[in-house]
């Protein structure tokens, strides 16, 4: 009897030990997938963020104009005006094109007296003078130069000669415009072409003094005819 009872007790102990071992092994196996799932979950946001970051950089570059290197350069309106007529035309061109403005201002201001000015202009022409310009301008960022001036004694003011001597317009488009009492450009367009042989000279716009203040339609038509309308 004791022997049988001892065997039963021993069997029960062995069975309980086996169940405990199986339960312990099963609990250890379930912890690995949990750890593995957490690792994959952590990796997913990093993987997903990479294309989003690249797209954001591309969008930011586009907004900042970093991909615009192939676009055409800007336009600059260079003008000299004594009475204000040429300036009025220059401002109208700016309003229609958005071009920048540069006024040619003589280092030594001209007189306000018209009769005296005529004498000075004639004297400058006869001596082939080059009046100094007060300021300078960087033309490197511009492909198009609108060049404006009044007609003085059948020619450009000599300060325009100064500008054309000092600045190389090679490879640029030059669009001349002027105001006059009725003489138009005279020979100025030929002179500009001779002084800037490597520039492309467009058809010019010449307005009478009385037309300068109300020239919106005329300027618009001219810009369209030379392919520079916005």
Image (cartoon, rainbow, N blue to C red):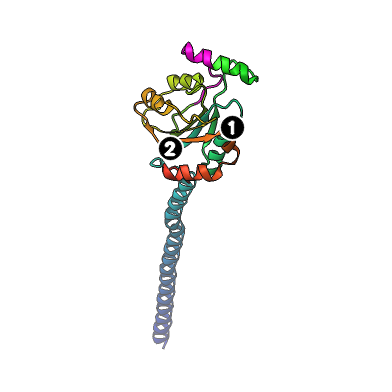
Residue 124 lies in the magenta-colored region? yes
Q: Quadrant of residue 5?
A: bottom left
Q: Residue furthest front?
A: 182
Q: Quadrant of residue 105?
A: top right
**Above or below for 219 versus 194:** below
Q: Which mark is residue 202?
A: none
Q: Residue at x 48, y 23 (%)?
A: 154
Residue 130 can be seen in this image: no
Q: Residues within 10 Å of mark 1 (few under 14, many from 20)?
A: many
What residue is drawn where x is 41% and y is 37%? 203
Position of 13 relative to 199 (above/below)? below
The residues colored magenta run: 122-137
In the rendered structure, find residue 73 and report the number of the disc placed on it.
2
Q: Residues within 10 Å of mark 2 (few under 14, many from 20)?
A: few
Q: Main secondary structure of the magenta part?
A: loop
- Measured as percent of width and height from the top left, residue 73 is found at 43, 37
Closer to the eye: label 2 or 1:
1
Query: Which quarter of the figure is the N terminus placed in?
Result: bottom left
Residues at discs 2 and 1 in contact (Cβ within 8 Å): no
Q: Is residue 62 visible?
A: yes
Residue 172 in the image: state x and y as whole percent: 39, 32
User: Label 1 belongs to which residue?
Assistant: 85
In this view, the residue in front, 201 or 230, is: 201
**Which image quadrant is residue 227 in?**
top left
Please state which of residues 123 and 163 is positioned toward the viewer in this rendering: 123
- Is 224 one of the magenta-colored residues? no
């Amino acid at each position: 009897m004791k022997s049988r009872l001892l065997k039963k007790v021993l069997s029960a102990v062995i069975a309980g030990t086996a169940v405990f071992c199986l339960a312990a092994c099963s609990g250890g196996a379930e912890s690995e997938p949990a750890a593995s799932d957490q690792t994959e979950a952590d990796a997913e946001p990093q993987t997903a963020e990479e294309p989003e970051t690249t797209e954001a950089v591309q969008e930011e570059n586009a907004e900042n104009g970093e991909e615009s290197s192939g676009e055409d350069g800007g336009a600059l309106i260079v003008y000299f005006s004594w009475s204000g007529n040429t300036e009025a035309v220059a401002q109208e061109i700016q309003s229609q094109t958005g071009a920048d403005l540069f006024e040619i201002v003589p280092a030594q201001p001209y007189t306000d007296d018209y009769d005296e000015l005529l004498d000075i202009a004639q004297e400058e022409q006869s001596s082939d003078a080059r009046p100094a310009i007060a300021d300078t301008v960087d033309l490197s960022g511009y492909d198009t130069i609108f060049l404006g001036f009044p007609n003085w004694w059948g020619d450009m003011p000599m300060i325009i000669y100064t500008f054309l001597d000092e600045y190389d317009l090679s490879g640029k488009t030059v669009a001349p415009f002027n105001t006059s009492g009725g003489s138009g450009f005279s020979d100025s367009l030929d002179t500009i072409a001779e002084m800037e042989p490597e520039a492309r000279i467009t058809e010019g716009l010449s307005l009478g003094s009385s037309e300068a203040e109300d020239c919106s339609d005329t300027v618009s038509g001219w810009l369209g005819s030379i392919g520079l309308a916005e």
